[in-house]
Image: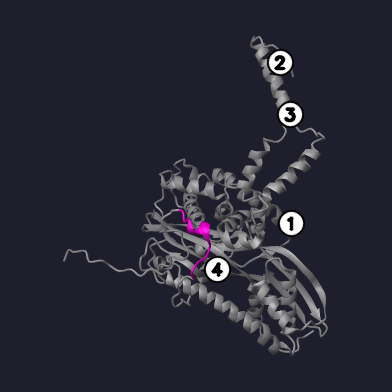
Amino acid sequence: MYVAVKGGERAIDNAHAWLAEERRGDTDVAELSIEQIREQLKLAVNRVMAEGSLYDPDLAALAIKQARGDLIEAIFLIRAYRTTLPRFGASLPISTGDMACDRRISATFKDAPGGQVLGPTFDYTHRLLDFKLAADGDVSPAPSAPPRTEPTPHITEFLQGQDIIQTEPENDAIPRDLTREPMSYPAGRDMRLQSLARGDEGFVLGVAYSTQRGYARNHAFVGELRIGSVAVEMEVPELGFAIDIGELELTECETVNQFKGSKTEPPQFTRGYGLVFGQSERKAIAVALVDRALRWKELGEDNVGAVAQDEEFVLSHADNIQATGFLEHIKLPHYVDFQSELELVRRMRREAGADVPEAAE
Amino acid sequence: MTPDIEIDTEDRRGWMGLLARSDEADLLHLWQSFGQAPGFTWLRAPEIGGVMVRGRMGGTGAPFNLGEMTVTRCSLRLQGGQVGHAYVQGRSKTKAEAAALIDALMQTELAAAVQRAVLVPLEEKRTENRVTRAGKAAATKVEFFTMARGED
Protein backbone atom coordinates (compact mmCIF):
# COMPACT_ATOMS: atom_id res chain seq x y z
CA MET A 1 0.00 0.00 0.00
CA TYR A 2 1.33 3.42 -0.93
CA VAL A 3 0.32 6.58 0.86
CA ALA A 4 1.43 10.02 -0.23
CA VAL A 5 3.47 11.68 2.45
CA LYS A 6 4.87 15.17 2.33
CA GLY A 7 8.15 16.22 3.81
CA GLY A 8 11.78 15.55 3.25
CA GLU A 9 12.25 17.98 0.35
CA ARG A 10 14.95 19.91 2.15
CA ALA A 11 16.71 16.71 3.22
CA ILE A 12 16.61 15.42 -0.37
CA ASP A 13 17.93 18.68 -1.84
CA ASN A 14 20.76 18.76 0.66
CA ALA A 15 21.55 15.09 0.06
CA HIS A 16 21.84 15.79 -3.67
CA ALA A 17 24.08 18.81 -3.04
CA TRP A 18 26.34 16.64 -0.92
CA LEU A 19 26.29 13.92 -3.57
CA ALA A 20 27.53 16.47 -6.14
CA GLU A 21 30.33 17.51 -3.79
CA GLU A 22 31.34 13.91 -3.07
CA ARG A 23 31.24 13.13 -6.78
CA ARG A 24 33.78 15.88 -7.38
CA GLY A 25 35.98 14.67 -4.52
CA ASP A 26 39.04 16.64 -3.40
CA THR A 27 39.12 19.81 -5.50
CA ASP A 28 42.92 19.87 -5.26
CA VAL A 29 42.81 16.86 -7.59
CA ALA A 30 42.15 17.65 -11.27
CA GLU A 31 38.60 16.97 -12.45
CA LEU A 32 38.01 14.04 -14.80
CA SER A 33 36.92 14.98 -18.29
CA ILE A 34 34.49 12.97 -20.42
CA GLU A 35 37.31 12.52 -22.96
CA GLN A 36 39.59 11.04 -20.29
CA ILE A 37 36.93 8.53 -19.25
CA ARG A 38 36.15 7.67 -22.88
CA GLU A 39 39.81 7.17 -23.80
CA GLN A 40 41.31 5.74 -20.61
CA LEU A 41 38.44 3.76 -19.07
CA LYS A 42 37.29 2.41 -22.38
CA LEU A 43 36.31 -1.03 -21.17
CA ALA A 44 34.00 0.49 -18.55
CA VAL A 45 32.52 2.67 -21.31
CA ASN A 46 32.02 -0.47 -23.41
CA ARG A 47 30.20 -2.24 -20.63
CA VAL A 48 27.87 0.71 -20.09
CA MET A 49 27.10 0.85 -23.83
CA ALA A 50 26.50 -2.92 -24.02
CA GLU A 51 24.21 -3.16 -21.00
CA GLY A 52 22.70 0.28 -21.55
CA SER A 53 21.94 -1.09 -25.05
CA LEU A 54 22.96 2.18 -26.70
CA TYR A 55 26.20 2.66 -28.63
CA ASP A 56 27.50 6.17 -27.86
CA PRO A 57 30.90 6.34 -26.13
CA ASP A 58 30.58 10.00 -25.07
CA LEU A 59 27.21 9.44 -23.44
CA ALA A 60 28.46 6.32 -21.66
CA ALA A 61 31.49 8.26 -20.38
CA LEU A 62 29.22 11.04 -19.10
CA ALA A 63 27.03 8.46 -17.36
CA ILE A 64 30.07 6.92 -15.67
CA LYS A 65 31.16 10.33 -14.42
CA GLN A 66 27.68 11.19 -13.17
CA ALA A 67 27.34 7.79 -11.49
CA ARG A 68 30.71 8.17 -9.74
CA GLY A 69 31.92 4.99 -11.43
CA ASP A 70 28.91 2.88 -10.36
CA LEU A 71 28.46 1.08 -13.67
CA ILE A 72 24.95 -0.21 -12.98
CA GLU A 73 23.85 3.33 -12.07
CA ALA A 74 25.52 4.52 -15.31
CA ILE A 75 23.68 1.83 -17.30
CA PHE A 76 20.45 3.01 -15.66
CA LEU A 77 21.13 6.58 -16.89
CA ILE A 78 21.78 5.34 -20.43
CA ARG A 79 18.62 3.22 -20.45
CA ALA A 80 16.59 6.21 -19.28
CA TYR A 81 18.12 8.43 -21.99
CA ARG A 82 17.54 5.75 -24.62
CA THR A 83 13.80 5.82 -24.03
CA THR A 84 13.72 9.53 -24.99
CA LEU A 85 15.18 8.92 -28.47
CA PRO A 86 12.87 8.67 -31.46
CA ARG A 87 13.60 5.44 -33.34
CA PHE A 88 14.69 6.22 -36.91
CA GLY A 89 14.57 2.59 -37.92
CA ALA A 90 16.57 -0.59 -37.85
CA SER A 91 19.85 -1.29 -39.60
CA LEU A 92 20.42 -4.00 -42.14
CA PRO A 93 22.00 -6.96 -40.34
CA ILE A 94 25.67 -6.15 -39.93
CA SER A 95 28.28 -8.28 -41.64
CA THR A 96 30.80 -9.40 -39.02
CA GLY A 97 32.70 -11.30 -41.73
CA ASP A 98 33.81 -7.87 -43.03
CA MET A 99 35.07 -6.77 -39.61
CA ALA A 100 38.36 -4.85 -39.51
CA CYS A 101 39.81 -7.07 -36.79
CA ASP A 102 41.96 -5.72 -33.96
CA ARG A 103 41.96 -9.17 -32.45
CA ARG A 104 41.04 -12.56 -33.83
CA ILE A 105 41.87 -15.84 -32.19
CA SER A 106 40.72 -19.43 -32.44
CA ALA A 107 41.14 -22.05 -29.76
CA THR A 108 40.35 -24.80 -32.26
CA PHE A 109 42.48 -24.12 -35.32
CA LYS A 110 46.07 -23.10 -34.90
CA ASP A 111 46.59 -22.36 -38.59
CA ALA A 112 43.30 -20.62 -39.32
CA PRO A 113 43.50 -18.46 -42.47
CA GLY A 114 44.07 -14.91 -41.27
CA GLY A 115 46.06 -16.22 -38.36
CA GLN A 116 45.94 -15.81 -34.62
CA VAL A 117 45.98 -12.07 -33.98
CA LEU A 118 46.25 -11.25 -30.30
CA GLY A 119 45.36 -7.56 -30.39
CA PRO A 120 45.51 -5.36 -27.27
CA THR A 121 44.82 -8.17 -24.80
CA PHE A 122 45.27 -8.69 -21.05
CA ASP A 123 45.99 -12.37 -21.79
CA TYR A 124 49.59 -13.34 -21.03
CA THR A 125 50.07 -10.35 -18.70
CA HIS A 126 51.24 -11.46 -15.28
CA ARG A 127 48.49 -9.67 -13.39
CA LEU A 128 51.08 -7.94 -11.24
CA LEU A 129 50.35 -4.34 -10.30
CA ASP A 130 52.36 -2.01 -12.48
CA PHE A 131 53.58 0.80 -10.22
CA LYS A 132 55.00 2.62 -13.23
CA LEU A 133 51.40 3.57 -14.09
CA ALA A 134 51.14 5.35 -10.74
CA ALA A 135 54.21 7.42 -11.58
CA ASP A 136 53.67 8.42 -15.21
CA GLY A 137 51.59 7.32 -18.15
CA ASP A 138 54.15 7.59 -20.93
CA VAL A 139 53.96 4.78 -23.44
CA SER A 140 56.14 3.98 -26.39
CA PRO A 141 54.31 3.41 -29.69
CA ALA A 142 53.17 -0.15 -30.36
CA PRO A 143 55.11 -2.01 -33.06
CA SER A 144 53.61 -2.28 -36.48
CA ALA A 145 53.80 -4.86 -39.25
CA PRO A 146 52.50 -4.94 -42.83
CA PRO A 147 48.71 -4.76 -42.44
CA ARG A 148 46.25 -7.33 -43.70
CA THR A 149 43.95 -5.62 -46.16
CA GLU A 150 41.48 -8.35 -47.07
CA PRO A 151 38.60 -9.37 -44.72
CA THR A 152 39.31 -12.19 -42.28
CA PRO A 153 37.06 -15.19 -43.00
CA HIS A 154 34.97 -16.75 -40.23
CA ILE A 155 36.47 -20.01 -38.97
CA THR A 156 33.14 -21.82 -39.05
CA GLU A 157 33.11 -21.35 -42.83
CA PHE A 158 35.86 -23.94 -43.12
CA LEU A 159 34.01 -26.46 -40.98
CA GLN A 160 30.82 -25.76 -42.86
CA GLY A 161 32.55 -26.59 -46.10
CA GLN A 162 33.01 -30.08 -44.71
CA ASP A 163 29.41 -30.25 -43.44
CA ILE A 164 30.76 -31.10 -40.02
CA ILE A 165 29.03 -28.23 -38.16
CA GLN A 166 25.48 -26.94 -38.05
CA THR A 167 24.76 -24.26 -40.63
CA GLU A 168 23.19 -20.91 -39.75
CA PRO A 169 21.05 -20.39 -42.84
CA GLU A 170 20.56 -16.72 -43.71
CA ASN A 171 17.04 -15.34 -43.75
CA ASP A 172 15.49 -11.93 -43.50
CA ALA A 173 12.78 -12.53 -40.93
CA ILE A 174 12.02 -9.44 -38.83
CA PRO A 175 13.33 -10.20 -35.33
CA ARG A 176 11.23 -9.53 -32.25
CA ASP A 177 12.37 -6.57 -30.17
CA LEU A 178 12.17 -6.72 -26.38
CA THR A 179 12.19 -2.93 -26.17
CA ARG A 180 8.97 -2.84 -28.17
CA GLU A 181 7.00 -5.80 -26.87
CA PRO A 182 6.79 -7.49 -23.51
CA MET A 183 8.88 -10.61 -23.03
CA SER A 184 6.85 -13.77 -23.47
CA TYR A 185 7.94 -17.37 -23.38
CA PRO A 186 9.11 -19.33 -25.28
CA ALA A 187 11.22 -16.33 -26.26
CA GLY A 188 12.95 -17.48 -29.45
CA ARG A 189 16.64 -17.19 -30.13
CA ASP A 190 16.29 -13.60 -31.44
CA MET A 191 14.89 -12.35 -28.11
CA ARG A 192 17.43 -14.45 -26.19
CA LEU A 193 20.43 -12.99 -28.02
CA GLN A 194 19.08 -9.45 -27.58
CA SER A 195 18.41 -10.00 -23.89
CA LEU A 196 21.83 -11.61 -23.27
CA ALA A 197 23.66 -8.85 -25.20
CA ARG A 198 22.24 -6.26 -22.77
CA GLY A 199 22.21 -8.60 -19.77
CA ASP A 200 24.38 -8.11 -16.71
CA GLU A 201 27.93 -9.28 -17.38
CA GLY A 202 28.28 -10.82 -13.94
CA PHE A 203 25.00 -12.70 -14.18
CA VAL A 204 25.63 -14.02 -17.70
CA LEU A 205 29.18 -14.96 -16.68
CA GLY A 206 27.87 -16.91 -13.67
CA VAL A 207 25.30 -18.83 -15.71
CA ALA A 208 27.89 -19.57 -18.41
CA TYR A 209 30.33 -20.78 -15.77
CA SER A 210 27.69 -23.11 -14.36
CA THR A 211 27.54 -24.89 -17.75
CA GLN A 212 31.30 -25.42 -17.62
CA ARG A 213 31.01 -26.83 -14.12
CA GLY A 214 28.55 -29.46 -15.27
CA TYR A 215 25.06 -27.96 -15.15
CA ALA A 216 23.95 -28.60 -18.74
CA ARG A 217 27.53 -29.06 -19.85
CA ASN A 218 27.95 -28.66 -23.60
CA HIS A 219 31.73 -28.89 -24.09
CA ALA A 220 32.37 -25.52 -25.67
CA PHE A 221 35.47 -24.59 -27.59
CA VAL A 222 36.00 -21.00 -28.63
CA GLY A 223 35.94 -21.61 -32.37
CA GLU A 224 36.57 -17.94 -32.89
CA LEU A 225 36.73 -14.70 -30.99
CA ARG A 226 37.03 -11.48 -32.94
CA ILE A 227 37.08 -7.83 -31.94
CA GLY A 228 37.07 -4.96 -34.38
CA SER A 229 35.00 -2.44 -36.24
CA VAL A 230 32.04 -3.10 -38.49
CA ALA A 231 30.06 -0.70 -40.67
CA VAL A 232 26.33 -0.27 -39.99
CA GLU A 233 24.07 0.18 -43.00
CA MET A 234 20.47 1.35 -43.06
CA GLU A 235 17.85 1.78 -45.76
CA VAL A 236 16.98 5.46 -45.86
CA PRO A 237 13.43 5.95 -47.16
CA GLU A 238 14.01 9.49 -48.49
CA LEU A 239 16.93 8.19 -50.59
CA GLY A 240 15.48 4.87 -51.63
CA PHE A 241 18.75 3.05 -50.99
CA ALA A 242 20.94 1.97 -48.07
CA ILE A 243 23.90 3.98 -46.78
CA ASP A 244 26.44 3.45 -44.03
CA ILE A 245 25.30 5.42 -40.99
CA GLY A 246 28.30 4.65 -38.81
CA GLU A 247 30.77 2.14 -37.54
CA LEU A 248 30.79 0.16 -34.30
CA GLU A 249 33.42 -1.71 -32.34
CA LEU A 250 32.04 -5.16 -31.56
CA THR A 251 33.12 -8.44 -30.00
CA GLU A 252 31.88 -11.67 -31.55
CA CYS A 253 32.33 -15.16 -30.16
CA GLU A 254 31.43 -18.38 -31.89
CA THR A 255 31.65 -21.56 -29.93
CA VAL A 256 31.92 -25.05 -31.37
CA ASN A 257 30.12 -27.54 -29.16
CA GLN A 258 29.44 -31.21 -28.91
CA PHE A 259 27.48 -33.16 -31.29
CA LYS A 260 24.03 -33.56 -32.51
CA GLY A 261 23.04 -36.34 -34.85
CA SER A 262 20.05 -38.48 -35.66
CA LYS A 263 19.08 -41.58 -37.62
CA THR A 264 19.04 -39.50 -40.79
CA GLU A 265 21.84 -37.02 -40.08
CA PRO A 266 25.39 -37.93 -39.12
CA PRO A 267 26.80 -36.26 -36.00
CA GLN A 268 27.70 -32.59 -36.35
CA PHE A 269 29.21 -29.97 -34.12
CA THR A 270 26.69 -27.50 -32.72
CA ARG A 271 27.13 -23.78 -32.17
CA GLY A 272 26.70 -20.98 -29.67
CA TYR A 273 26.89 -17.31 -30.54
CA GLY A 274 27.63 -14.12 -28.68
CA LEU A 275 27.74 -10.59 -30.10
CA VAL A 276 28.31 -7.58 -27.84
CA PHE A 277 29.00 -3.84 -28.23
CA GLY A 278 32.62 -2.81 -27.68
CA GLN A 279 35.68 -4.79 -26.69
CA SER A 280 34.04 -7.12 -24.21
CA GLU A 281 35.25 -10.65 -24.71
CA ARG A 282 34.37 -12.12 -21.33
CA LYS A 283 30.79 -11.10 -22.01
CA ALA A 284 30.78 -12.36 -25.61
CA ILE A 285 32.09 -15.79 -24.61
CA ALA A 286 29.58 -15.98 -21.76
CA VAL A 287 26.69 -15.07 -24.07
CA ALA A 288 27.77 -17.79 -26.52
CA LEU A 289 27.85 -20.46 -23.80
CA VAL A 290 24.43 -19.48 -22.47
CA ASP A 291 23.00 -19.19 -26.01
CA ARG A 292 24.17 -22.73 -26.68
CA ALA A 293 22.72 -24.09 -23.43
CA LEU A 294 19.36 -22.43 -24.15
CA ARG A 295 19.17 -24.19 -27.54
CA TRP A 296 18.64 -27.59 -25.87
CA LYS A 297 15.08 -28.04 -27.13
CA GLU A 298 15.87 -27.11 -30.73
CA LEU A 299 18.80 -29.57 -30.67
CA GLY A 300 16.75 -32.37 -29.14
CA GLU A 301 18.74 -32.53 -25.91
CA ASP A 302 17.39 -33.53 -22.51
CA ASN A 303 16.29 -30.88 -20.08
CA VAL A 304 18.44 -31.78 -17.10
CA GLY A 305 16.84 -29.06 -15.01
CA ALA A 306 19.89 -26.82 -15.09
CA VAL A 307 19.54 -23.07 -14.65
CA ALA A 308 21.31 -22.45 -17.97
CA GLN A 309 18.55 -24.37 -19.80
CA ASP A 310 15.75 -22.42 -18.15
CA GLU A 311 15.03 -19.62 -20.60
CA GLU A 312 12.48 -17.91 -18.40
CA PHE A 313 14.77 -17.95 -15.38
CA VAL A 314 17.82 -16.71 -17.28
CA LEU A 315 16.10 -13.97 -19.26
CA SER A 316 13.96 -12.75 -16.35
CA HIS A 317 16.99 -12.24 -14.15
CA ALA A 318 19.69 -11.13 -16.61
CA ASP A 319 18.69 -7.47 -16.69
CA ASN A 320 20.52 -5.57 -13.97
CA ILE A 321 18.29 -2.49 -14.26
CA GLN A 322 15.12 -4.47 -13.64
CA ALA A 323 16.89 -6.36 -10.88
CA THR A 324 18.36 -3.36 -9.14
CA GLY A 325 15.11 -1.42 -9.44
CA PHE A 326 13.16 -4.09 -7.65
CA LEU A 327 15.90 -4.93 -5.19
CA GLU A 328 16.63 -1.36 -4.18
CA HIS A 329 13.02 -0.24 -3.94
CA ILE A 330 12.68 -2.12 -0.65
CA LYS A 331 14.88 0.49 1.04
CA LEU A 332 12.32 3.20 0.27
CA PRO A 333 9.61 3.98 2.84
CA HIS A 334 7.25 1.05 3.45
CA TYR A 335 5.95 2.45 6.76
CA VAL A 336 2.32 1.55 6.16
CA ASP A 337 3.09 -1.95 4.82
CA PHE A 338 5.24 -2.61 7.80
CA GLN A 339 2.67 -1.19 10.23
CA SER A 340 0.07 -3.68 8.99
CA GLU A 341 2.50 -6.59 9.33
CA LEU A 342 3.38 -5.44 12.82
CA GLU A 343 -0.27 -5.45 13.80
CA LEU A 344 -0.75 -8.87 12.24
CA VAL A 345 2.14 -10.48 14.09
CA ARG A 346 0.96 -8.96 17.37
CA ARG A 347 -2.53 -10.36 16.84
CA MET A 348 -1.13 -13.79 15.99
CA ARG A 349 1.01 -13.74 19.09
CA ARG A 350 -1.99 -12.77 21.22
CA GLU A 351 -4.04 -15.57 19.69
CA ALA A 352 -1.19 -18.01 20.33
CA GLY A 353 -1.37 -17.01 23.98
CA ALA A 354 1.98 -15.28 24.12
CA ASP A 355 1.80 -12.59 26.73
CA VAL A 356 3.17 -9.63 24.83
CA PRO A 357 3.44 -6.36 26.67
CA GLU A 358 2.53 -3.49 24.32
CA ALA A 359 5.76 -1.74 23.48
CA ALA A 360 5.83 1.99 23.41
CA GLU A 361 5.41 3.21 19.84
CA MET B 1 14.05 19.18 -59.07
CA THR B 2 16.72 17.27 -60.89
CA PRO B 3 20.29 17.74 -59.80
CA ASP B 4 22.65 19.85 -61.90
CA ILE B 5 24.82 16.88 -62.61
CA GLU B 6 24.13 13.20 -62.99
CA ILE B 7 24.53 11.47 -59.62
CA ASP B 8 25.71 7.91 -59.49
CA THR B 9 24.00 6.11 -56.58
CA GLU B 10 27.15 4.18 -55.71
CA ASP B 11 29.14 7.43 -55.52
CA ARG B 12 26.51 9.02 -53.32
CA ARG B 13 26.42 5.99 -51.02
CA GLY B 14 30.18 6.32 -50.80
CA TRP B 15 30.31 9.96 -49.70
CA MET B 16 27.27 9.75 -47.42
CA GLY B 17 28.78 6.74 -45.67
CA LEU B 18 32.13 8.46 -45.36
CA LEU B 19 30.48 11.55 -43.85
CA ALA B 20 28.42 9.41 -41.44
CA ARG B 21 31.44 7.55 -40.08
CA SER B 22 33.90 10.42 -40.03
CA ASP B 23 35.20 12.03 -36.89
CA GLU B 24 33.21 15.17 -36.14
CA ALA B 25 36.28 17.36 -35.54
CA ASP B 26 37.98 16.21 -38.77
CA LEU B 27 34.85 16.82 -40.83
CA LEU B 28 34.10 20.25 -39.37
CA HIS B 29 37.69 21.35 -39.74
CA LEU B 30 37.77 20.43 -43.44
CA TRP B 31 34.31 21.86 -44.07
CA GLN B 32 35.15 25.18 -42.43
CA SER B 33 38.44 25.39 -44.31
CA PHE B 34 36.50 24.90 -47.54
CA GLY B 35 34.96 28.26 -46.69
CA GLN B 36 31.54 27.94 -48.30
CA ALA B 37 28.37 28.83 -46.47
CA PRO B 38 25.66 28.28 -49.06
CA GLY B 39 22.17 29.49 -48.26
CA PHE B 40 19.61 26.77 -47.63
CA THR B 41 16.25 26.02 -46.09
CA TRP B 42 15.60 23.16 -43.74
CA LEU B 43 13.37 20.39 -44.98
CA ARG B 44 14.00 18.58 -41.70
CA ALA B 45 15.95 20.35 -38.99
CA PRO B 46 18.64 18.23 -37.30
CA GLU B 47 17.10 15.59 -35.08
CA ILE B 48 18.84 13.14 -32.71
CA GLY B 49 17.48 9.62 -32.60
CA GLY B 50 18.32 5.96 -32.31
CA VAL B 51 18.73 3.18 -34.85
CA MET B 52 18.33 -0.43 -33.79
CA VAL B 53 21.43 -2.32 -34.93
CA ARG B 54 20.82 -5.89 -36.07
CA GLY B 55 23.20 -8.79 -36.11
CA ARG B 56 22.87 -12.30 -37.50
CA MET B 57 22.82 -15.47 -35.40
CA GLY B 58 26.10 -17.26 -35.86
CA GLY B 59 27.28 -14.30 -37.97
CA THR B 60 25.36 -15.53 -41.01
CA GLY B 61 21.91 -16.69 -39.90
CA ALA B 62 18.60 -15.09 -38.97
CA PRO B 63 18.65 -11.45 -37.78
CA PHE B 64 18.33 -10.35 -34.14
CA ASN B 65 18.32 -6.96 -32.46
CA LEU B 66 21.66 -6.22 -30.83
CA GLY B 67 21.07 -2.73 -29.40
CA GLU B 68 20.69 0.84 -30.55
CA MET B 69 23.15 3.50 -31.69
CA THR B 70 22.73 7.26 -31.71
CA VAL B 71 22.25 8.91 -35.10
CA THR B 72 21.53 12.51 -36.11
CA ARG B 73 19.68 13.23 -39.33
CA CYS B 74 18.60 16.28 -41.28
CA SER B 75 17.55 17.33 -44.76
CA LEU B 76 17.93 20.68 -46.47
CA ARG B 77 17.47 22.40 -49.83
CA LEU B 78 20.01 24.73 -51.39
CA GLN B 79 18.82 27.90 -53.07
CA GLY B 80 19.52 26.17 -56.39
CA GLY B 81 17.02 23.46 -55.40
CA GLN B 82 19.42 20.58 -54.68
CA VAL B 83 18.38 18.50 -51.69
CA GLY B 84 20.99 17.21 -49.24
CA HIS B 85 20.38 14.50 -46.66
CA ALA B 86 22.46 13.35 -43.73
CA TYR B 87 22.30 10.38 -41.37
CA VAL B 88 25.43 10.57 -39.25
CA GLN B 89 26.60 8.58 -36.25
CA GLY B 90 26.44 10.37 -32.90
CA ARG B 91 24.58 13.38 -31.56
CA SER B 92 26.17 16.33 -33.33
CA LYS B 93 23.72 18.59 -35.13
CA THR B 94 26.59 20.63 -36.62
CA LYS B 95 28.11 17.47 -38.07
CA ALA B 96 24.74 16.50 -39.58
CA GLU B 97 24.28 19.98 -41.05
CA ALA B 98 27.75 19.97 -42.63
CA ALA B 99 27.17 16.45 -44.01
CA ALA B 100 23.82 17.45 -45.57
CA LEU B 101 25.33 20.59 -47.10
CA ILE B 102 28.17 18.55 -48.56
CA ASP B 103 25.68 16.01 -49.92
CA ALA B 104 23.76 18.84 -51.58
CA LEU B 105 26.87 20.57 -52.96
CA MET B 106 28.00 17.26 -54.44
CA GLN B 107 24.98 17.65 -56.75
CA THR B 108 26.16 21.03 -58.03
CA GLU B 109 29.00 22.29 -60.20
CA LEU B 110 31.00 22.63 -56.96
CA ALA B 111 31.15 18.83 -56.66
CA ALA B 112 34.75 18.51 -57.83
CA ALA B 113 35.93 21.24 -55.46
CA VAL B 114 34.11 19.67 -52.48
CA GLN B 115 35.50 16.31 -53.39
CA ARG B 116 39.03 17.70 -53.46
CA ALA B 117 38.83 19.87 -50.37
CA VAL B 118 36.73 17.72 -48.05
CA LEU B 119 36.02 14.17 -49.18
CA VAL B 120 39.45 13.16 -50.40
CA PRO B 121 41.31 14.30 -47.25
CA LEU B 122 38.58 12.75 -45.08
CA GLU B 123 38.95 9.42 -46.86
CA GLU B 124 42.74 9.64 -46.58
CA LYS B 125 42.55 10.28 -42.84
CA ARG B 126 40.21 7.35 -42.46
CA THR B 127 42.39 5.03 -44.49
CA GLU B 128 45.43 6.13 -42.52
CA ASN B 129 43.67 5.33 -39.20
CA ARG B 130 42.55 2.00 -40.52
CA VAL B 131 45.96 1.03 -41.83
CA THR B 132 47.63 2.08 -38.58
CA ARG B 133 45.31 -0.15 -36.53
CA ALA B 134 45.62 -3.03 -38.99
CA GLY B 135 49.41 -2.65 -38.81
CA LYS B 136 49.41 -2.86 -35.02
CA ALA B 137 47.11 -5.89 -35.20
CA ALA B 138 49.44 -7.54 -37.73
CA ALA B 139 52.35 -7.07 -35.32
CA THR B 140 50.46 -9.18 -32.74
CA LYS B 141 49.96 -12.11 -35.12
CA VAL B 142 51.38 -15.29 -33.66
CA GLU B 143 54.10 -17.01 -35.64
CA PHE B 144 54.12 -20.64 -34.53
CA PHE B 145 57.16 -22.82 -34.65
CA THR B 146 57.37 -26.47 -33.77
CA MET B 147 60.03 -27.64 -31.36
CA ALA B 148 61.85 -30.87 -32.12
CA ARG B 149 60.18 -33.60 -30.12
CA GLY B 150 63.28 -35.74 -29.85
CA GLU B 151 61.61 -38.94 -30.92
CA ASP B 152 62.94 -39.62 -34.41
Magenta-highlighted stretch: main secondary structure? Answer: loop
**Of marks 2 and 1, which one's residue comes earlier in the chain?**
1
Measuring from the top left, give residue B5's x and y in whole percent: 72, 89
Give the secondary structure at mark 1. Answer: loop
Label 2 in the same subunit as label 3: yes
Q: Which residue is rendered at x = 69% and y = 78% of the image?
A: B29
Amino acid identity at mark 1: Thr
**Of marks 1 and 3, which one's residue comes earlier in the chain?**
1
Give the secondary structure at mark 2. Answer: loop
Residue in the foreground of this view, choosing between A311 and A198: A198
Q: Label 1 belongs to which residue?
A: A84
What is the C-alpha distance between the residues marked 2 and 1?
A: 50 Å
Q: Would you identify the image quadrant in which residue A235 lies? A: bottom right
Measuring from the top left, give residue B6's x and y in whole percent: 70, 88
Q: Are marks 2 and 3 in contact (CB under 8 Å)?
A: no
Q: Which mark is residue A335?
A: 3
Chain holding disc 1: A
When the figure is inspected, residue B70 is found, relative to residue A1, above or below; the finding is: below
* Mark 3 crowd level (few <14, some 14–19, many ≥20, 10 Å Cα): few
Residue in the foreground of this view, choosing between A171 and A347: A347
Q: Quadrant of the N terminus of chain B?
A: bottom right
Whether residue A138 appears in magenta in the rendering, the answer is yes
Chain holding disc 3: A
